[in-house]
Image (cartoon, helix red, strand yellow):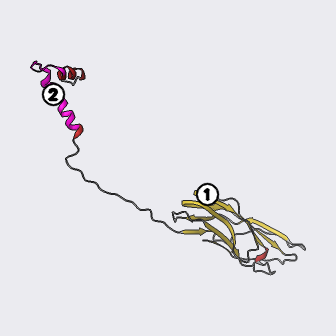
Amino acid sequence: MAFRPREVLPVLLAPLGTTMRKIIIVAPVVAGALLLLSAGPASAADTGTTFQIVGGGLAISAPVGPVSLGTKAPTAAPETITSPLGNVTVTDGRGGVLGWVASVASTAFTGATAVPASAISYVPPVATVTGVALVAATPAIDLTTAKTVQTATAVVGANSAVWNPALAVVVPAGAQAGTYNAVVTHSVI
């Protein structure tokens, strides 16, 4: 038989000594409901739980090379050779809030004519960022010493940044024909 709330009130208000069959049915249902509402579990056991996020490292990768910057005919005046270097990627797996700074330096170009590292410029575009970080690009002129080219701030957790910089080399007037080689080094801290 289903519980009917309208039947509880007459039962509770019935004068003593009045015989009502409904008391037999309603009283155990009400008592059982009150018991269930007031009683807690017979036994309980709590188990604390944890998990850990383990931070990784900070790394930079760049094309292995050699990367061809193109060709030019010999000229009597200085000329600039400009070409994309290829994707450079910073991967920050530390999982923290510290920013990072990517830098670049280069050796001089070796070949028939001296082309110093001071004649090399690096033009990074705005990086494509994954994760939470504000990354700002800074062009660099004269790669004799390491120059900052990308700076990440407002970092939250793991992030990465990818960019494809242009390398510009001012070839001096009267440069002789031949192949010229240099090593461009990227670093991140």
Residue 136 occupies quadrant: bottom right
| Cα separation between marks 1 and 2 | 69 Å
Q: Let me know if residue 29 is in the magenta part.
A: yes
What is the quadrant of the C terminus in the image? bottom right
Residue receiving disc 1: 129
Picture layout, residue 98 above or below residue 35 = below
Q: Nearer the viewer, residue 109 or 55?
A: 55
Give the side of residue 36 with respect to residue 84, left or right: left
Picture layout, residue 139 above or below residue 40 = below
Label drawn at residue 172: none
Q: Nearer the viewer, residue 137 or 8?
A: 8
Percent coordinates x, y for residue 44 in the rendering: 24, 50
Q: Report the mark closest to the observer, 1 or 2.
A: 2
Residue receiving disc 2: 27
Give the residue drawn at x 60%, y 68%: 61
What's drawn in magenta, residue-wise? 13-36
Please tell me whether mark 2 sits on a helix, a strand or a loop.
Answer: helix
Residue 89 occupies quadrant: bottom right
Give the side of residue 123 with respect to residue 100, left or right: right
